[in-house]
Image: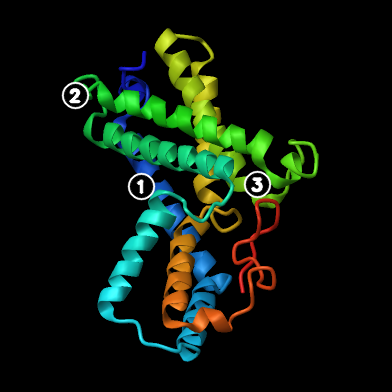
Amino acid sequence: MFTGNPFAELSASIPPVVMQTYIVVMVILVASGTLFDIVHKKSARYFFNNWRNAKNKATQQVSGGKMVSLAVQTAVVDGLTSGEFCNVQRRIAHLLTMYGFLAYVITTVIMVFWYPTPATPAPAILPQLWYLGALLVCLGGYWFWFFIRVDVAAEGNSPFHVVRADLFILSLLASVTLGLVWATLQATGNSWTNVFLGLYLIATTVLFASVPWSKFSHMFFKPVAAFQKRVAEANGSRSNLPGPADQPEIFGSARQQPRHY
């Protein structure tokens, strides 16, 4: 089961071009949703103003070579290893979810566009990575949702208390979980396959179409904020800024509505 391309099997009832078009539409929704977030919520203005203020308060110049070094550090420490998380459990959960989601999305695109039918069999490693990626998302995501969230772990609130800020993680978990269930049922020839396929498509559409209202786009903003922080520390302007306790959350906490300034 874990070596079969679920999308190739689906091509018997849904033409590959329909699946490919759906993916293109989802990419467009993410891009347009992120642009909406930048323009309507003035995210780009916030980053530009913050960068300009930091530059005006700088006490020393940062060379081009140093800027490249800071960019590499940001990519490796904050991007690849999620170094901004001090809590080890939260960091591990985030990494599991992030790398699982990347593997899941990338293999989906490859299988749908390059190996869309049984006549073009995909290398066994691709569906294996697809299942593994989905399982990693579920492991990291459900671990975070039920055990690591601040209001659950520290405040003792119910894990079923939901606010709008939870839209991204919940739609992500719903999409991946339903995808796994659908693929498993399809491989076993279960009569519920089409039902879960429909639910999978609904959850996936919500995930990618809700970018303007969820925290999806924050994954694009966080590296920029991390880079700005490193530059501010390098040019001396960060010493003139308020401490972390006095600064507003750029993106909102795990249980707050996303905020933009």
In the depicted structure, whether residue 254 falls above or below residue 14: below
| Residue bearing the label numbered 1 | 24
Name the disc covering residue 120, or none: 2
As measured in the structure, the alpha-carbon distance from the residue carrying label 1 to the one carrying label 2 is 21 Å
Residue at 60% across, 33% down? 143
Residue nearest the observer in this picture, 205 or 83: 83
Residue at 31% across, 22% down? 5
As measured in the structure, the alpha-carbon distance from the residue carrying label 2 to the one carrying label 3 is 39 Å
Residue nearest the observer in this picture, 83 or 171: 83
| Residue bearing the label numbered 3 | 166
Instruction: Count neighbours of disc 3 (C-alpha within 10 A) and say few if under 14, some if 14 to 19, many if 20 or more.
Output: some
The reply, left or right, for residue 183 in relation to residue 249 is left
Q: Earlier in the sequence, mark 1 or mark 2?
A: 1
Q: Earlier in the sequence, mark 2 or mark 3?
A: 2
Q: Earlier in the sequence, mark 3 or mark 1?
A: 1
In the depicted structure, whether residue 164 falls above or below residue 99: below
* Quadrant placement of the C terminus: bottom right
